[in-house]
Image (cartoon, rainbow, N blue to C red):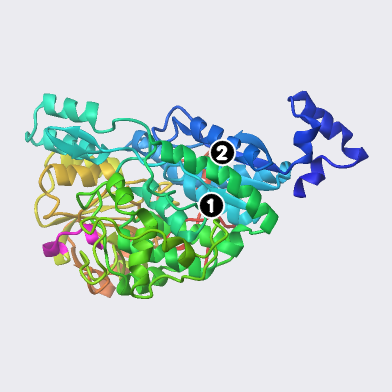
Amino acid sequence: MRSDLMKKGVEKAPHRSLFKAMGYTQTELERPIIGVANSANEIIPGHIDLNKISEAVKAGIRLAGGTPVEFSTIGVCDGIAMNHQGMRYSLASRELIADSVEVMAMAHPFDGLVLIPNCDKIIPGMLMAAMRLNIPALVVSGGPMLSGRAGGKPVDLVSVFEAVGAFKSGQITPEQLSQLEDHACPGCGSCAGMFTANSMNCLTEALGMGLPGNGTIPAVTAARTRLAKAAGMRILELIRQNICPRDIATREAFENAVAVDMALGCSTNTVLHVPAIAHEAGIDLNLETFNRISAGTPHLCSLRPSGTHFLEDLNAAGGVQAVMNELSRRDLIHLDTMTVTGKTAGDNLRAFPVLDRDVIRPIDQPYHNEGGIAVLYGNLAPEGAVVKQSAVAPEMLRRTARARVFDSESEAATAILDRLIKPGDVVIIRYEGPKGGPGMQEMLTPTAALVGMGLGKDVALITDGRFSGGTHGEAIGHVSPEAAVGGPIALVEEGDEIAIDIPGKKLELLVDAATLEKRRAVWTPPAPRIREGYLARYAHMVTSGSCGAILQWDECK
């Protein structure tokens, strides 16, 4: 066993003594030792209950004859970090989480790992570590939050963000805003719609690294606890069979995950996280892969924020496996990929028919013929930009708009809430990319404000930053190269016309090349916003959003 490195032989008597100082018995030390990475904390609603999940995992490990050893990781709540300095740390935390799991699993050679995340960056961070380490591992998440109810209708966190804009424009009263605040998030779990956390939990299952149900079983149910026990038992079988993450996460498995991404209408952040996970598995997953798979994969589910259904509805309809089952009718799933069940994806999905055709549409009656995400190219985004096309109003798919230019997210949000943005504008937010931010802030506050103020079908937003999974409307992010490294978005001026053609996958700044060269000649890079600490190091090492914003010494090619 791998753990023999820290427990077997005469020379390891001191090591065993330290284990025994913690109460471990000799019998426990003779069993496989399983690291349990528990990201529980008291600042993320999706993580407040993860100690319960961890206890269930550890019970499962003991039932199967292993010895669990729990350790912790950090985690950032994107909602609480939104629209202030904290958001700069959100994406950057992904690398710290991956590194922390690596450190713990290398310093203490566990035989296997059970990874317990639930929210935005913790999930990909743990998956990146699993790929990097390549020892038997699986993920069991904490599960989604139930929807709330206010004003006689179902609501969620995004309802509150949008209500701020509605309040600022006089559409709702302080009492109505307070009611939403009190009832939108009724309890623990990852926010109730197909936002980034639930997107990544669903894609973990589609990738084969989580058991069936990982993406959709609600946090508060006994089924979630049973799933955690099953995960604890299953890790012992993965060790016995020597099934490791890179045996599961093949190129075909990543293509399965992208296909499910398109069918569900997942967060645009998946276009950052999935390539980053693939990179750790030694697989180059470029942006064209997303466009290629999107072109052939219908959008089958209308989930919040752009639709009406919640994760609890998707779970009742059969969950991720049922979506994969439906996609397999058109040969859009690689059925022979291995999963943490020890069975193939095809073997797994046969047990999960579609139970509600209102939630999971038949493949020949989709919401859209193409998948939820599109990557746009043009002189404004030579390396690509990302949009959730399934969340864009039909009349916004092709248009020309006039640029309103802001050099920070806070400036743009203030202008929107002060009602300075008009129909026909396109809000440009730049210097918020991975390096320029630094940290690539989410733009939920300005996009939600636009929707809440009734401008969601009249105003586009383009940024080298990124968006919350809760964003909907014509929100185009990850513009690459970013402004801080001299990307064309740095050259846009107030009043410039920008042509947006989402079906044609085009994003063009309607300014002639000679004028742009004159602007470039006088452009100078801005001074770094942060000069010390982790974010300064992060800004130095982070690559383009088009490469997944991974950390490398050299820029990805």
Seen at 10% across and 57% down, the residue is 424
Front tag of 2 and 1: 2
Q: Position of residue 204 (x, y in %)?
A: 46, 54
Seen at 42% across and 40% down, the residue is 223
- Whether residue 296 is situated above or below residue 36 in the rendered picture: below
Quarter of the image for residue 507 reads bottom left
Q: Which residue is mark 1?
A: 127
Along the horizontal axis of the image, is 272 left or right of 62?
left
Q: Secondary structure at mark 1?
A: helix
Queried whether the magenta region covers residue 80, the answer comes back as no
Q: Position of residue 506 (x, y in %)?
A: 26, 71
Quarter of the image for residue 385 reads bottom left
Seen at 46% across and 67% down, the residue is 346
- Whether residue 555 is situated above or below residue 236 in the rendered picture: below
Stretch of the chain drawn in magenta: 389-396
Q: Secondary structure at mark 2?
A: helix
- Asked if residue 69 can be seen in this view, the reply is yes
Instruction: Examine the residues drawn in magenta and state their main secondary structure.
Output: helix
Q: Which residue is mark 2?
A: 57
Q: Position of residue 363 (x, y in %)?
A: 26, 69
Amino acid type for the residue under numbered disc 1: Leu
Distance from disc 2 to disc 1, alpha carbons, whole Å, reads 18 Å
Q: Nearer the viewer, residue 549 or 529?
A: 549
